[in-house]
């Protein structure tokens, strides 16, 4: 139904430089699919969605909807938009119209429906999203969740072939997220074609037929929810799915700034809410490893990873130019190594020169 | 609420008007122009007496319009005023506690003024004048006028010629109301000079069209081509003769200095307040059908206001569109134009348009007014519109577009109604300001409500009643406009609350 080829989008910054958000996007959306677009913030998920109905003008590439190239000047974009609903993060209900008028205006104006017919259909839709009583209210009288449900009903009033959801729950109080997700879930069950940008991972996993993982301006990895969530193939996907946070430092020789490093570790642990005990462990292990165990026959790189999903912390010490395995050369009776092992749950050396410590 | 406020204001105005300035100085030894040094003297701005007193020096000159001179003396704002002595003699000064102190100030002759290039017209006028003076007709006619101006005014109700003879043009004649030379009786222009000029036009075949100006605006209007003739009891001074081609003199003039009479303290016997009001009402509105002049003026004010509002809305919409253009080449110059328009006082724009930009065109003051007001208030309206449009969230545009509406449909159905709902309050203030501001159009020879009251004041020399009346009418206008706009506002909001 929608075909995207070599889509590229650049933004001009106020300073006049151009910022490439989407480098080279290729994807297809077929009828009946529920596609979710996920990825780190700033990777252009919303931009991609907005390029599909040309709310953003792509820099180059091809976007075809039912065979019509929407970037072609001769294509009437307004006709195509009528069959592509869009739900916004900020709802964007028409503030001066009642909820029912929000639903009926475009069907009357654009589809030529009679007022009676449009209002009957509108009330029906309000019924399905549970807002029958709010038909005569102005948007400002509704809660966030109600507004978003009304906005979904407004899309449906145009009888679209596909609905684009642009972070539909990001602006909502946590208590209101589920009512909106329930409505979207309901639509998915009815076989509506949808394309969703969302940060609600559990929801995305449940509702999608296919997931696009967007990273660095391309479709980095693509697959079913099982493939993406349970067995991601690429490191960035994995990091994102497990919500892994990292801290990296490189030390040229033994005379590095230990207390500066402690400061960095302190900040890192504070940021992700790790307690004092874990902070002290990480600092101790770092000190023992760097001051006692690592041979420093070249620069040493330290990577601390914290997975928000599993709450696991791992530290990797990598010795460049390592000639032999480090742990074996240290000896079982080394006090430093004993202390490290005492504080961690697992110490391994998968490759010579790379020590991996799990806490 | 409005009613009570109005009553309070009225009471305050009445109290102020009944207070008389205190004057203890003895004026008995002032018997010539030179003696006026050290005294305050009210004169018509730009008139010959104004120039004369400036030359004497040491006189505290209070420059007013003709209608305010007597009132100024009555209320003690000035010790003396200088009026045409003939006019002063016609007035019932005694009843107002005033008297003529001395006469024959700047005795001289007055004539009609023409453009320097218009010597042919001037010669024709002089020939006519010479003929009727030579046969003695002129003197007897003038005597009749002087004896009983009011009855002569009726006799002279010959309508000014409206159609020119072939080969003759229509003459635009600039006048200033100045009883008994040029004044309105039963809403018709008459007076010694008007009667005389009508006869000349009748005989010579010119059509004639009188336009009322401030005295000080007559010479600029003549030289910019707005008028062809000055007929305003204008004294022929050397300075004026440099700019104006005067006809042969046909009437004599001289001033009288008027002050409060020595026994003026006896004014306590004046009639009570209600009687005075009744008399004012009769003098200003009923006699000589002043109400018709006021009604015509009100109609002009309403017409100018409505047309100006329409023009301002259109200009404002255009300026708003250009100002909001994404192209800096368009939006930047528009911003400058708006700043310039808003930076010049409206009256100055009006004069510039009338005397400079459209000087040579025969566009009437009404249209120049509508254009000036349209531009000036267009700049204000445009910025108000822009504020309204910018207050509409970008998301509203996106939502409309995403549903498949064209940009124009989004504007008409979504952005515009929302913007209008937000700016109508501010707009209401601007519209009322515009209506009140139309009171300056008298400067470009349009007789609106304010100018009509000026004309009546120039005739009755009563400041209080016409001004209060005009204020009341403006308050009513503003109130009605406000009501109208509030109705629109209510409809806007109720529309969005259907069901």
Image (cartoon, coloured by chain):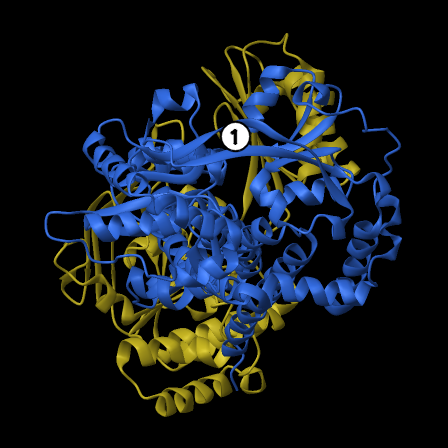
Rendered residue at 28%/63% (across/down) = B406
Rendered residue at 74%/21% (across/down) = A335
**Foreground of the two, A326 or B465:** B465
**Foreground of the two, B25 or A15:** B25
**Horizontal side of residue B432 vs B6, given as left or right:** left
Chain B colour is blue
Q: Tell me if residue A13 can be seen.
A: no
Where is residue B136? Give x, y as percent: 33, 43
Where is residue B306? Give x, y as percent: 43, 61
Q: Is residue B267 above or below residue B230?
A: below
Query: Which chain's colour is yellow?
Result: A
Where is residue B429? Give x, y as percent: 58, 55
Q: Is residue A189 above or below residue B264?
A: below
**Quadrant position of residue A266:** top right
Badge 1 density bin: few <14, some 14–19, many ≥20, Cα 10 Å? some
Q: Is residue A268 above or below residue A242?
A: above
Which chain does tag 1 point to? B
Q: Is residue A73 above or below residue B232?
A: below
Q: Which residue is mark 1?
A: B46
Where is residue B447? Give x, y as percent: 45, 53
Q: Tell me if residue A329 can be seen.
A: yes
**Quadrant position of residue B241:** top left
Rendered residue at 39%/73% (across/down) = A155
Secondary structure type for disc 1: loop
Rendered residue at 36%/45% (across/down) = B138
What quarter of the picture does the N terminus of chain B occupy?
bottom right
**Horizontal side of residue B327 vs A328, given as left or right:** left
**Foreground of the two, B131 or B418:** B131
């Amino acid at each position: 139904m929608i075909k995207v080829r070599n889509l590229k989008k650049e933004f001009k910054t106020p300073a006049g430089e151009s910022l490439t958000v989407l480098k080279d996007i290729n994807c297809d959306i077929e009828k009946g699919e529920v596609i979710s677009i996920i990825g780190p913030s700033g990777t252009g998920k919303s931009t991609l969605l907005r390029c599909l109905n040309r709310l953003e003008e792509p820099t180059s590439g091809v976007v075809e909807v039912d065979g019509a190239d929407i970037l072609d000047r001769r294509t009437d974009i307004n006709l195509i938009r009528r069959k592509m609903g869009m739900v916004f993060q900020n709802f964007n209900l028409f503030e001066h119209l009642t909820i029912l008028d929000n639903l009926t205006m475009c069907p009357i104006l654009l589809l030529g429906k009679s007022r009676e017919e449009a209002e009957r259909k509108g009330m029906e839709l309000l019924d399905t999203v549970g807002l029958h009583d709010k038909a005569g209210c102005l948007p400002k009288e509704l809660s966030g969740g109600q507004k978003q449900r009304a906005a979904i009903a407004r899309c449906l009033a145009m009888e679209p072939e596909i609905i684009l959801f642009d972070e539909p729950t990001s602006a909502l109080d946590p208590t209101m997220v589920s009512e909106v997700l329930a409505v979207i879930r309901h639509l998915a069950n009815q076989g509506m074609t949808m394309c969703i940008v969302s940060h609600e991972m559990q929801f995305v996993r449940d509702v999608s037929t296919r997931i696009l993982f967007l990273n660095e301006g391309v479709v980095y990895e693509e697959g079913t929810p099982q493939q993406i969530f349970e067995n991601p193939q690429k490191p960035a996907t994995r990091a994102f799915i497990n919500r892994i946070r990292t801290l990296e430092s490189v030390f040229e020789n033994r005379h590095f700034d230990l207390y500066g490093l402690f400061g960095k570790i302190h900040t890192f642990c504070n940021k992700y809410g790790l307690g004092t005990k874990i902070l002290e462990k990480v600092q101790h292990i770092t000190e023992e490893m760097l001051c006692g165990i690592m041979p420093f026959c070249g620069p040493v790189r330290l990577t601390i990873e914290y997975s928000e999903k599993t709450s696991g912390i791992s530290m990797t010490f990598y010795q460049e130019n390592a000639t032999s395995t480090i742990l074996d050369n240290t000896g079982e009776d080394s006090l430093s190594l004993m202390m490290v092992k005492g504080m961690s749950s697992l110490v391994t050396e998968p490759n010579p020169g790379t020590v991996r410590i799990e806490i | 609420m409005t009613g009570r406020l109005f009553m309070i204001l009225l009471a305050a105005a009445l109290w102020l008007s009944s207070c008389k300035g205190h004057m203890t100085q003895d004026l008995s030894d002032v018997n010539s122009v030179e003696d006026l040094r050290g005294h305050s003297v009210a004169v018509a701005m730009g008139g010959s007496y104004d120039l004369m007193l400036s030359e004497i020096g040491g006189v505290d000159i209070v420059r007013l319009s003709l209608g305010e001179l007597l009132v100024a003396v009555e209320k003690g704002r000035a010790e003396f005023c200088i009026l045409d002595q003939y006019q002063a003699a016609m007035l019932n000064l005694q009843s107002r506690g005033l008297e003529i102190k001395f006469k024959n100030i700047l005795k001289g002759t007055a004539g009609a003024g023409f453009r320097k290039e218009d010597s042919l017209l001037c010669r024709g006028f002089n020939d006519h004048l010479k003929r009727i003076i030579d046969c003695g007709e002129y003197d007897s006619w003038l005597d009749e006028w002087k004896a009983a101006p009011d009855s002569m005014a009726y006799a002279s109700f010959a309508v000014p010629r409206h159609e020119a003879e072939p080969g003759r043009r229509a003459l635009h004649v600039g006048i200033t109301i100045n009883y008994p030379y040029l004044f309105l009786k039963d809403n018709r222009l008459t007076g010694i000079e008007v009667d005389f000029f009508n006869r000349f036009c009748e005989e010579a075949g010119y059509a004639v069209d009188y336009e009322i100006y401030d005295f000080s605006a007559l010479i600029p209007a003549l030289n910019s081509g707005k008028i062809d003739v000055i007929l305003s009891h204008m004294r022929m001074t050397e300075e004026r003769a440099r700019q104006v081609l005067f006809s042969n003199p046909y009437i004599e003039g001289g001033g009288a200095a008027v002050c409060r009479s020595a026994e003026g303290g006896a004014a306590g016997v004046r009639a009570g307040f209600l009687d005075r009001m009744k008399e004012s009402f009769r003098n200003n509105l009923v006699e000589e059908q002043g109400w018709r002049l006021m009604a015509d003026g009100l109609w002009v004010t309403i017409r100018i206001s409505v047309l100006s509002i329409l023009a301002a809305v259109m200009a404002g919409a255009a300026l708003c569109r250009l100002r909001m253009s994404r192209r800096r080449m368009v939006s930047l110059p528009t911003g400058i134009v708006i700043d310039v328009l808003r930076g010049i006082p409206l009256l100055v724009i009006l004069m510039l348009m009338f005397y400079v930009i459209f000087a040579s065109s025969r566009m009437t003051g009404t249209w120049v007014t509508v254009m000036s007001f349209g531009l000036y208030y267009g700049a204000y309206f445009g910025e108000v519109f822009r504020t309204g449009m910018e207050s509409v969230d970008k998301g509203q545009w996106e939502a409309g577009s995403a549903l498949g509406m064209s940009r124009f449909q989004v504007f008409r159905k979504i952005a515009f109604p929302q913007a209008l709902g937000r700016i109508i309050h501010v707009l209401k203030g601007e519209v009322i300001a515009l209506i009140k501001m139309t009171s300056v159009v008298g400067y470009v020879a349009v007789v609106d409500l304010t100018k009509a009251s000026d004309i009546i004041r120039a005739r009755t020399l009563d400041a209080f009643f016409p001004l209060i009346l005009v204020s009341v009418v403006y308050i009513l206008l503003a109130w009605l406009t406000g009501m109208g706009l509030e109705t629109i506002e209510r409809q806007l909001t109720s529309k969005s609350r259907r069901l």
